[in-house]
Amino acid sequence: MGDIEVNPHWWESIMVSEVFLIKGENRKNAIASLLAQYKLDQFKGKQVAFKTNYNSADPFPAQTHPATVKFIVKELQTAGAKEIIIGERSGMANTQDVLVQSGVIELAKKLKIDVQIFNDLPFAGWIHIDLEGSHWNRGFLFARLYIDADIVVQTCCLKTHRFGGHFTMSLKNAVGMIARYHPQDGYDFMNELHGSPHQREMIAEINTAYEPTLIVMDAVKAFVKGGPAGGEEVTPNLFLAAKDRIALDAVGVALLRHYGTTKEVDRGPIFEQAQLARAIELGLGATSLRDIKLVPLDDDAEAVAEDIVAQFAK
């Protein structure tokens, strides 16, 4: 029997959760290339709930870059989306003020899309989620918009989180989909979350309430330490897209490690990070690197993909 030829890129052919990567600073071209990898006819005639990342009014990468919002919306509109609604709740400031200061309200008017601010939603605007075996004392209230919409699209940033989340990407972005206060009795869900030793597991549990169709991560810049509003900044000049939140965030952790990050994010196997481990327990996506297919869309991204895979081996 002859020698067996080993494919050095064996991982490219057997994994199921695709993560697309493209290098560059041109948001219009990068986003168009990423979205071209998806069946855009699925958006035709559909209501799209769009989760951005406006936790504060601090500039990108603390928040979604306005051009990222613009070009994602334009691609979805070209694909025939019937309605696009940004739904948001900021954590570090008043949401209305954040969206005004960040130019989102004005941009939404120009793009002819709606914005729903969650802070003052009545109880009817929420759905109570009480997951069996969760770490939430009394469940949480999840914005009805993201359950009733035909399709959910999300865009997140690449950054660490110094307030206990360790990192904040697609899984952590879902915190802005739940209520801070219960509109009937004033219960403070955010006080519970940030005061719990199980914060990272609770973040993953929020994500059981919805299923995204598309997630775009804008990693032109990133915080590798500090975060979410400011920190040590690097410039990966990278865009990523996926449907699988675990796969995308695992790749994001690998990128943070590549640039040198906090001891919490750098510690242990990537899939044993608490957010990811709990999300895996809940069946939300990839369980290991073998479940992920990295798809570079240009030569520069090919080299990045190799660096990412190397981080999983540490």
Image (cartoon, rainbow, N blue to C red):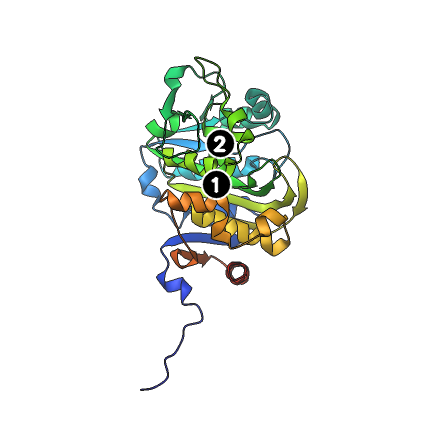
Question: Do callouts 1 and 2 mark residues in contact (Cβ within 8 Å)?
Answer: no
Residue at 49% across, 44% down: 274
Quadrant showing the N terminus: bottom left
Q: Which residue does the image show at 61% across and 45% down from the upper left?
A: 222
Percent coordinates x, y for residue 105 in the rendering? 54, 24
Q: How crowded is mark 2: few (under 14 residues within 10 Å), some or many (20 or more)?
A: many
- Is 62 left or right of 279, judged from the image as shown? right
Q: Residue 253 — which label?
A: none
Residue matched to label 1: 170
User: In this orientation, which residue lies closer to the viewer: 200 or 209?
Assistant: 200
Q: Which badge, 1 or 2, comes first in the chain's sequence?
A: 1
- Structural distance between the alpha carbons of marks 1 and 2: 10 Å
Q: What residue type is labelled 2?
A: Val
Local SS, label 2? helix
- Compared with 122, 265 (above or below) is below
* Amino acid marked by disc 1: Ser
Tag 2 residue: 175
Q: Which quadrant, please, contains the C terminus?
A: bottom right
